[in-house]
Amino acid sequence: MTLSIRNQLPGTVTEVHPGQVMAVVKLRLDGGQDLTAAITRESAEDLALAPGSAVRALVKSTEVSLATQRVEGLSIRNQLPGAVVGLTTGAAMACVRISLPGGELTAAITEDAATDLGLFVGSDVIALIKATEVSLATA
């Protein structure tokens, strides 16, 4: 299956916490970072997720926000540090490629936001991803 979702990060499930409707799944990405996904309990069961399961975390580039430093007091669970390795700006939007340990992540943000953050190739950033915006896939 080919997907339009650019961000496909391989990892391994470390914990599964099923609730009545949703499950919180924690994983360790191949680059060593921890990532949290909040998916339906039914999906976690359908995928037979358990510690040790190999998965791919899928995140649309429009669901990745950026900061220039770690953010405290925020409900967003996932904060992945990286460096900008590509920056393409247009009249309204910017596409930012971020190098992470073990891979790359793409963020689609407004051109105004890229300018306000002072982004340039080589700048350090923190990719912010809500757990509810992370989908999981198994092989």
Image (tube, helix red, strand yellow):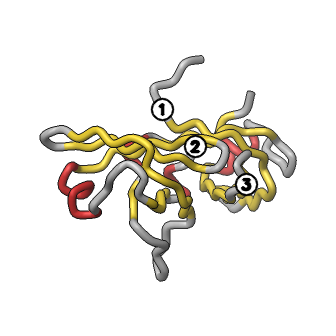
Residue ID at (82%, 42%): 53
Q: Number of numbered discs present? A: 3
- Mark nearer the N terminus (1 vs 2): 1
What quarter of the picture does the C terminus occupy? top right
Where is residue 134 shown, x and y percent of the image?
Answer: 55, 48
Q: CA distance from mark 3 to mark 2?
A: 19 Å
Residue ID at (79%, 58%): 15
- Mark nearer the N terminus (3 vs 1): 1
Q: CA distance from mark 1 to mark 2?
A: 10 Å
- The residue furthest right is 52
Q: Amino acid at mark 3?
A: Gly
- Helix, strand or loop for disc 2: strand
Q: Nearer the viewer, mark 3 or mark 2?
A: 3
Where is residue 78 shown, x and y percent of the image?
Answer: 56, 62
Residue at image mark 1: 5
Q: Is residue 86 above or below residue 74?
A: above
Residue at image mark 2: 135
- The residue furthest top is 1
What quarter of the picture does the N terminus occupy? top right
Q: Nearer the viewer, mark 3 or mark 1?
A: 3
Which of the labelled discs sits on residue 32, or is there none? 3
Say whether marks 1 and 2 touch (CB < 8 Å): yes
Residue ID at (39%, 59%): 66
Q: Amino acid at mark 2?
A: Ser
Q: CA distance from mark 3 to mark 1?
A: 22 Å
Q: Amino acid at mark 1?
A: Ile
- Mark nearer the N terminus (3 vs 2): 3
Residue ID at (47%, 47%): 98
- The residue furthest front is 122
